[in-house]
Amino acid sequence: MSDGQVISGVGTYFALDDDVGGTLTDISTFLNSVQGANDQDELDGTNFQPGVADPVKNFIPGFSSRSFNIGGNWSEDAEVFFSAVNGKSGLNYQYGPRGTDTGRVKLSGTCSLLGYTGPQSSVSGITTFSARVRVSTRVVGTF
């Protein structure tokens, strides 16, 4: 349970299968950024409203598209791992924003890894990589 305090991201845990039906692999040490996203469709369920002075639209939630944008400092090990799973669906994932201590929140399920891009280099910066983890199923639980 949360103690109500803000947390540092340095203890973040993220694991991903090394292949479809493979082994869940801790990739936390490859990463320095995990950004969740949720795109929720809005369906217009508005009916005619004759005689209403201030008509109001009725929006109904539609499909949800969840993902994680992940990135980190590129390494040869990261290249080998992500190149092997790029474009694959049915991968298992686990995400622990506060790490893996007993009782901490765990987001898990299945996903696809899309758009691995690495290495990305600049003359005055660190060589990095990025990828999108598109979530197919999502379970909120605890470690």
Image (cartoon, rainbow, N blue to C red):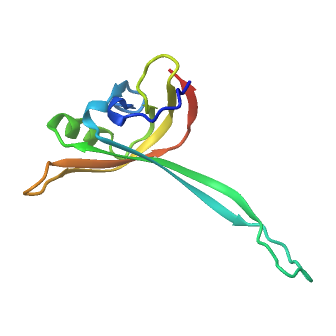
Q: Is residue 38 above or below residue 141?
A: below
The residue nearer to you, when weighing 94 against 103, is 103
| 102, above or below 72, in the image | above
Who is closer to the viewer here, 80 or 31?
Answer: 31
Occupied quadrant, residue 112 = top left
Point out residue 136 in the picture as x, y percentages from the top left corner.
53, 43
Answer left or right for 102 relative to 26.
Answer: right
Q: How many marks?
A: 0
- Relative image position of residue 87 (x, y in whole percent): 36, 47
Report the side of 84 relative to 75 (left or right): right
In the image, residue 100 lies at what x, y percent? Answer: 42, 22
Q: Residue at x 36, y 36 (%)?
A: 9
Q: Looking at the image, which residue is at 63% across and 54% down? A: 63
Name the residue furthest top: 102
**Residue 132: x, y in percent?**
38, 49
In-front residue for pair 71/51: 51
In the displayed structure, does residue 13 sit left or right of residue 140? Answer: left
- Vertical arrangement, residue 104 with respect to residue 120, above or below: above
* Placement of the N terminus among the 4 image quadrants: top right
**Residue at the left extreme?**
123
The residue positioned 15% from the left and 48% from the top of the image is 127
Residue at the spot x=9%, y=56% of the render?
A: 124
Q: Residue 44's quadrant in the figure?
A: bottom right
* 37 to the left or right of 45: left
- Residue positioned most to the right: 51
